[in-house]
């Protein structure tokens, strides 16, 4: 009896700090150095699918990132979250990712280098499903799809064509 009570008391004492250590409610705005917002759906990339054919993806915005409150370089990863749906509609899909930094209120300039390295063309596909990059601090960015191509299996009765869904995470 004493042994069970002793172990229960020790377990309770060990668990108390963990709830406090990992809890965060976002109340302290000074800690919020990063803001990610999805783009307006009207500005999203456009995919026109016609039958069993090769098609193109027009340019569009995905996310807006604000890291003006930090000087640190921040790594990001862009994911396609619905590859399991896309494989039923497309044989392949290649999407060219664009990174832009805000230079003035309505002006964006293409990012050519990040963290001291020249930026190569980045693609996200149904095979890799993700793309990683690092953005320099103290700036606002937008993530876009510059262009893309796909091969569609076509539309059959009762079947809808899937469009890619994206998720952006910061490390």
Image: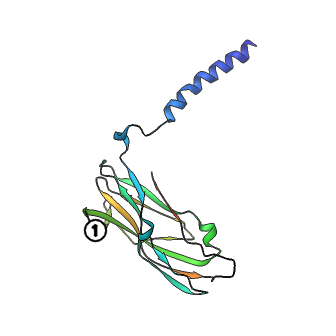
Query: Is residue 23 rendered to the left or right of residue 87?
Result: left
Mark 1 — residue?
A: 109
Q: Left or right: 31 with respect to 126?
A: left
x and y percent of residue 69 in the render? 30, 47
Query: In terms of secondary structure, where does tag 1 sit?
Result: strand
Question: Is 117 or 79 nearer to us in this picture?
Answer: 79
Does residue 34 sit above or below 149 in this rendering?
A: above
Tell how many labels: 1
Q: Quadrant of residue 61?
A: bottom left
Query: Residue at 41% of width from left, 55% of height from top?
Result: 36
The residue shown at (31%, 58%) is 140
Residue at image location 54% in from the left, 76% down from the top: 93
Q: Crowding near pointer 1: few (<14 within 10 Å), some, many (20+)?
A: few
Q: Residue furthest top?
A: 2
Quadrant in the rendering for residue 91? bottom right
Q: Is residue 85 above or below residue 169?
A: below
């Amino acid at each position: 009896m004493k042994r069970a009570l002793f172990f229960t008391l020790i377990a309770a004492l060990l668990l108390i700090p963990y709830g406090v250590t990992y809890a965060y409610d976002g109340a302290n705005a000074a800690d919020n150095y990063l803001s990610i917002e999805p783009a307006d759906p009207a500005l999203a990339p456009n995919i026109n699918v016609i039958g069993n054919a090769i098609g193109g993806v027009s340019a569009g915005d995905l996310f807006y990132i604000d890291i003006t409150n930090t000087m640190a370089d921040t790594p990001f990863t862009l994911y396609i979250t619905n590859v399991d749906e896309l494989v039923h509609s497309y044989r392949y899909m290649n999407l060219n990712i664009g990174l832009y930094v805000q230079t003035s209120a309505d002006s964006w300039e293409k990012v050519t280098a990040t963290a001291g390295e020249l930026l190569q063309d980045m693609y996200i596909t149904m095979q890799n499903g993700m793309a990683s990059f690092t953005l320099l601090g103290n700036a606002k960015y937008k993530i876009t799809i510059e262009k893309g191509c796909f091969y569609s299996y076509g539309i059959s009765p009762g079947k809808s064509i899937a469009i890619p869904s994206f998720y952006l995470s910061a490390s």
